[in-house]
Amino acid sequence: MANILIIVGTESGNAQMCADHLANNLPRLGHAIEIAGDADAGCVELAGREIVLVCTSTHGDGELPDNLIPLAERLRRDSPDLGAMRYGVIALGDQTYSSTFCKAGKDMDALLAVCGAQKVGERLEIDACTQPLPDEDALNWAQEWVTLL
Ligand SMILES: Cc1cc2nc3c(=O)[nH]c(=O)nc-3n(C[C@H](O)[C@H](O)[C@H](O)COP(=O)(O)O)c2cc1C
């Protein structure tokens, strides 16, 4: 069993919907899920966290959702030692934005890696153009991901 913190970056709710779907379904597999959502992802404390799943969309021209910016700035500024943390990334985007596809998820992935956190599995990238049910995609991926923890 894993205690998983899902950190959500969202502007219009799709990433939150994915996180909620995981929180509704992963406990059946024996995992405990906590969500740092729209309001509290920016100020979440990562020290002491063992397993984190970042679930974020990309907005603007390859930018993080507003609610995730304070966390990213803190990671960049403080470079905390996250060597004890394992993480995964679910990145939501749209291939129409070809040069910045899922860039926020990629940036959060790189930031956590620079702080020493160890990535588990490959990042999931969900394309809004071709995937009308991102929460189903996220759950399918997460069911595999938890077996790697
Ligand atoms: C104004 C705007 C800008 C966007 N910019 C990007 C982008 O640069 N790269 C990308 O991959 N997706 C981009 N997207 C697509 C969103 O990431 C995608 O629709 C996602 O599912 C939204 O999730 P959310 O509701 O959790 O914010 C953009 C969407 C909007 C509305």
Image: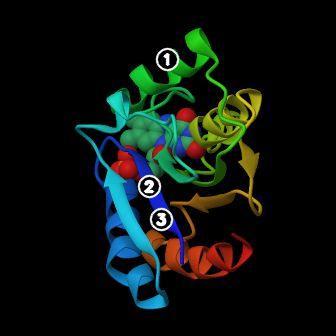
Q: Amino acid at mark 1?
A: Arg
Instruction: Identify the residue position indicated by label 3 in the image.
Output: 3
CA–CA distance in space, label 3 to label 1: 23 Å
Q: Indicate the quadrant containing the N terminus: top left, top right, bottom left or bottom right.
A: bottom right
CA–CA distance in space, label 3 to label 2: 10 Å
Q: Position of residue 8 (x, y in %)?
A: 40, 48
Q: Point out the residue furthest to the top here.
A: 77
Q: Secondary structure at mark 2?
A: strand
| Residue at point 64%, 18% (across, down) | 79
Q: Position of residue 132 (x, y in %)?
A: 45, 73
Q: Is mark 3 within 8 Å of ligand 1?
A: no
Q: Amino acid at mark 2?
A: Ile
Q: Residues within 10 Å of mark 2 (few under 14, many from 20)?
A: many
Instruction: Identify the residue position indicated by label 1 in the image.
Output: 74
Q: Is residue 29 above or below residue 47?
A: below
| Residue at point 35%, 38% (across, down) | 41
Q: Indicate the quadrant containing the C terminus: top left, top right, bottom left or bottom right.
A: bottom right
Residue 6's tag is: 2
Question: Which is more N-terminal, label 1 or label 3?
Answer: 3
Q: Is residue 144 above or below residue 97?
A: below
User: Do tag 2 and tag 1 residues touch (Cβ < 8 Å)?
Assistant: no
User: Do tag 3 and tag 1 residues touch (Cβ < 8 Å)?
Assistant: no
Q: Secondary structure at mark 3?
A: strand
3 vs 2, front mark:
3
